[in-house]
């Protein structure tokens, strides 16, 4: 299997605050890698630094064999990286359909037809969004908003999904649906996912690999099942 993403010795932070220290991770094509760790460990910063929202201060990011370390965010999207931020980033004043259309903006007017097709595929995947296409973002439930955020990312036809806590604040049955969907995207469409989660059990339940970070650095990595059964590690870093 080939690595779709290779992050090596990444450094990043905000102003004088250094958050990521020598952070490295690899993600194989068509797999799910879960990134776990306590609040403030640097998980969101790691995703933002990979997707270009926070400029890297050192290290390299290689995507599909090419160095993308210092590319602008727009170029990342064109190449197939889609970042779904914590909370989803749905725009409350826009309708479901308008939010989905944002996922295809990078194609310009010439790509409007492709975007319309991609939106149709999202409606096939999430029937609920199709039923609510004229609803505004603020009229949706938390679960629907998260589905919309995921749907918008899929409209961009990504090769890699960077997901920041998609289960946050959602009831267990909805979390289970989202996790099942991610598994289906991997198994049926070959999607590659880097998944940041506080919900350790759910994330390791679908992930192939797991990485545990603490204070911006990797403290453990391995097969998801091995991490899940490592009682010491769970107690030390994952709080259960
Ligand atoms: P959480 O699960 O709480 O989101 P996390 O592991 O994702 O935690 P980060 O959000 O990456 O952690 O935060 C890591 C550190 O960076 C924290 O000390 C946080 O206060 C700080 N931080 C995050 N965003 C910013 C920002 N925009 N400006 C300054 N400091 C920030």
Image (spheres, helix red, strand yellow):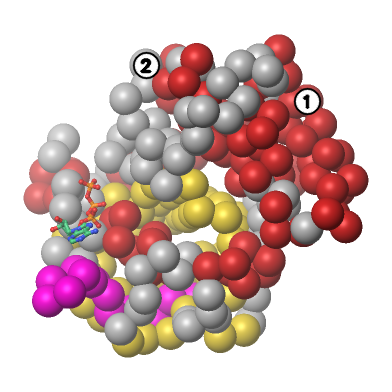
Q: Earlier in the sequence, mark 2 or mark 1?
A: 1
**Residue 222 seen in the figure:** no
Residue in view at x 43 percent, y 85 percent? 60
**Does the magenta stretch mainly form a helix, a strand or a loop?**
strand
Discs 2, 1 touching: Cβ within 8 Å: no
Q: Position of residue 187 (x, y in %)?
A: 68, 43
Residue in view at x 33 percent, y 64 percent? 46
* Rendered position, 18 above or below 168: below
Q: Position of residue 196 (x, y in %)?
A: 37, 49
> Left or right of 16: which side holds 37?
right
Examine the image and state in which quarter residue 64 appears: bottom right
> Left or right of 87: which side holds 99?
right
Specify start and end residues of the magenta stretch as a single range. Answer: 6-20
> Left or right of 28: which side holds 50?
left
Badge 2 crowding class, 10 Å Cα cut-off, few under 14, some 14 to 19, many 20 or more, is few
* Rendered position, 71 above or below 99: below
Q: Position of residue 121 (x, y in %)?
A: 79, 34
User: Whole-Å distance between the Cαs marked 2 and 1?
Assistant: 23 Å
Residue in view at x 63 percent, y 26 percent? 96
Q: Position of residue 127 (x, y in %)?
A: 71, 18
Is disc 1 placed on a helix, strand or loop? helix
Figure quadrant of the C terminus:
top left
Per the image, the residue denoted by label 1 is 124
Q: Nearer the viewer, residue 77 or 124?
A: 77
Per the image, the residue denoted by label 2 is 171
Figure quadrant of the N terminus:
bottom right
Q: Nearer the viewer, residue 195 or 1?
A: 195
């Amino acid at each position: 299997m080939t690595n779709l993403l290779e992050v090596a010795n990444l450094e990043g932070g905000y102003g004088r605050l250094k958050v990521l220290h020598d952070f490295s991770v690899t993600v194989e094509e068509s797999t799910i890698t879960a990134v776990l760790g306590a609040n403030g460990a640097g998980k969101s910063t790691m995703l933002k630094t990979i997707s270009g929202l926070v400029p890297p201060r050192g290290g390299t990011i290689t995507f599909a064999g090419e160095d993308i370390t210092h590319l602008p965010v727009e170029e990342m999207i064109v190449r197939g990286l889609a970042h779904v931020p914590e909370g989803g980033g749905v725009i409350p004043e826009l309708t479901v359909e308008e939010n989905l259309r944002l996922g295809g903006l990078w194609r310009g007017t010439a790509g409007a037809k492709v975007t319309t097709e991609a939106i149709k595929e999202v409606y096939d995947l999430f029937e609920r969004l199709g039923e609510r296409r004229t609803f505004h973002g603020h009229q949706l439930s938390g679960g629907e908003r998260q589905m919309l955020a995921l749907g918008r990312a899929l409209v961009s036809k990504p090769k890699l999904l960077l997901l920041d806590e998609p289960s946050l604040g959602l009831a267990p049955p909805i979390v289970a649906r989202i996790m099942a969907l991610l598994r289906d995207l991997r198994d049926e469409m070959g999607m590659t996912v880097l998944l940041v989660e506080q919900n350790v059990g759910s994330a390791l339940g679908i992930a192939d690999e797991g990485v545990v970070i603490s204070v911006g650095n990797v403290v453990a990595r391995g097969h998801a099942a091995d991490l899940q059964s490592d009682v010491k590690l769970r107690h030390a870093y994952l709080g259960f």
